[in-house]
Amino acid sequence: MTPENIISIFLGIGLAAAVGFRVFIPLFIMSIVTYFGHLHLVSSFAWIGSFNALLLFAIATIIELLAYFVPFIDNVLDTIAVPLAAIAGTIVMAAVLVDLPEVMTWSLAIIAGGGTAAAISGTTATTRVASSTTTLGIANPLIATAEIGSSLIISLLAIVVPVISMIVVVVILYLLYRLAKKILKNKK
């Protein structure tokens, strides 16, 4: 495995983690960067860098961002966001794994990409449910803002400095694990 392969794995995991916070922000950023020629994707995912995809991801991002600021609608969105994040995490990971054998690409995409996105999305959904029940949804816009910021920062880090994004992802996964453990403990 070459250093470029390792960097592409870090890039994919970073983007997948960002998808766990918001599904369309990383896809939109990925589309912009690819459209302007700064990111090269696996040929079967080159459509992500098309103008039509860029426009579609922009619209989807705006709708997603606005919807998450409406308490209780955000909880409904989480029911579809968790499986959608797993799918999108798999896609972003597979799209950036250039020059890897197909079996390795899809294994990494499903396990590392989809798994990372689903873990983060599931934990944030659990956090939002806890917030909805304890604050009647009043704190949910704050959570949405933190998730948007996390998705944006991790997406940009993944593209600019994939190694740093990987470190940030590991720290976030650890913190989310602790948070989920605490929430589940409080439910008992």
Image (tube, rainbow, N blue to C red):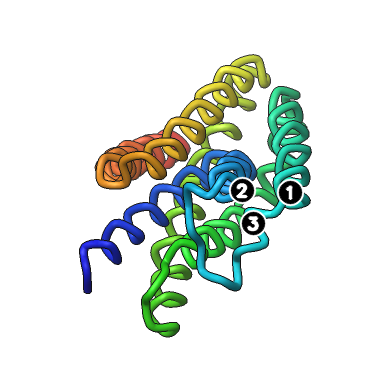
User: Marks 2 and 1, how far apart in space?
Assistant: 7 Å
Residue type, mark 1 in image: Phe
Check residue 35 in the rendering and tell me which mark sits there, or answer none.
Answer: 2
Check residue 51 in the rendering and tell me which mark sits there, or answer none.
Answer: 1
Hey, which residue is sitting farthest front in the picture?
Answer: 37
When asked about the image quadrant of residue 112, the answer is bottom left
> Pointer 2: residues within 10 angstroms few (<14), some, or many (20+)?
some
User: Marks 2 and 3, how far apart in space?
Assistant: 8 Å
Left/right placement of residue 101 relative to residue 62 reads left
Look at the numbered disc 2 and give the secondary structure of its residue.
helix
Look at the numbered disc 3 and give the secondary structure of its residue.
helix
Q: Is residue 114 visible?
A: no
Which residue lies at the image location 30% right of the left edge and 38% below the top edge? 168
Q: Looking at this view, is 128 or 70 the one in front? A: 70
Mark 3 = which residue?
48
The quarter of the image holding the C terminus is top left
- Residue 110 pos. (x, y %): 47, 70
Look at the numbered disc 1 and give the secondary structure of its residue.
helix
| Badge nearest the viewer, 1 or 3 | 1
